[in-house]
Amino acid sequence: MTAGRHVNTLSQSWGTPPKYVNAIKTFWGGHIGLDPCSNEYSVVHADLEFLLPDKDGLREEWNSKTIFVNPPYGADRNRGTTIKDWFAKCVSAHRDYGADVIALVPVAPNTGHWKKFVFGCANSICFLYDTRLKFLENGKDTGKGAPMACCLIYWGTEKERFMEHFMDYGATIDISNLQNCKIGNERKEQILMFATD
């Protein structure tokens, strides 16, 4: 079990709680353009949904105005992918197509995928107040809570509106000031490089 979800051996049909689906739909005027990692039990009902095994969302184009991503949190050994691949796709959809992207993911700022695809790339984060987010399991609320804190990450152009809208669901912060900045070890390396010149 990885981050509260079983990896490959049991069902991966974990769904977004309806209150967050509704909040995201309201933010985007009533609908979601694309759900690239949907499942047969999803309550998202995006205009376009990619469902395995017919459509692998990581192999499809994410050319949509609004994209909501609740990716598998564990590794998919059959496809050789992890959550970092979903983060990378979020960044490229925003960069290449100008898409507004919101991802529901575990809070893990110490990981490489956060350092590479969130800090310096995303605009805002909402750290959800729910301490144990109750994902739908095969479309049903089983009452089980996730064992980790979760957040909504926003790659988009309406950061002030995102922060105001999602303040009802958690602490929102603007991280757009980190874009195009060297952070952490990259910053230290840059400082050392200038010091030796």
Image (cartoon, rainbow, N blue to C red):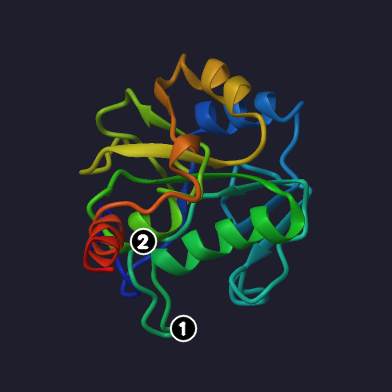
In this orientation, does residue 38 appear?
no
Q: x%, y% of residue 9? A: 31, 74
Q: Which mark is residue 113?
A: 2
Image position of 70 with respect to 83: above or below: above
- Circle count: 2
Say which mark, if any, is on residue 102: none
Give residue 117's quadrant in the image. bottom left
* Residue at mark 1 to residue at mark 2: CA–CA distance: 18 Å
Label 2, residues with CA under 10 Å away: few <14, some 14-19, many ≥20:
some
Q: Position of residue 103 (x, y in %)?
A: 51, 46
Residue found 43% across the figure and 20% down from its top: 169
Work out whether residue 184 or residue 150 is closer to the camera in this orientation and state it: 184
Q: Say which residue appears at 39% left-offset and 41% top-offset.
A: 135
Which residue bears the numbered disc 1?
A: 79
**Three-letter code, disc 2:** His
Figure quadrant of the C terminus? bottom left
Q: Please tell me whether residue 55 is drawn above or below residue 92 in the rendered image.
A: below
> Is 168 displayed left or right of 90 in the figure?
left
- Tell which of 41 and 169 is nearer to you: 169
| Looking at the image, residue 16 lies above or below residue 69 | above
The image quadrant of residue 134 is top left
Residue 185 position, x and y percent, is 24, 60
Question: In the rendered structure, which amino acid carries the disc numbered 1?
Answer: Arg
Determine which quarter of the picture holds residue 75.
bottom left
Q: Residues within 10 Å of mark 1 (few under 14, many from 20)?
A: few
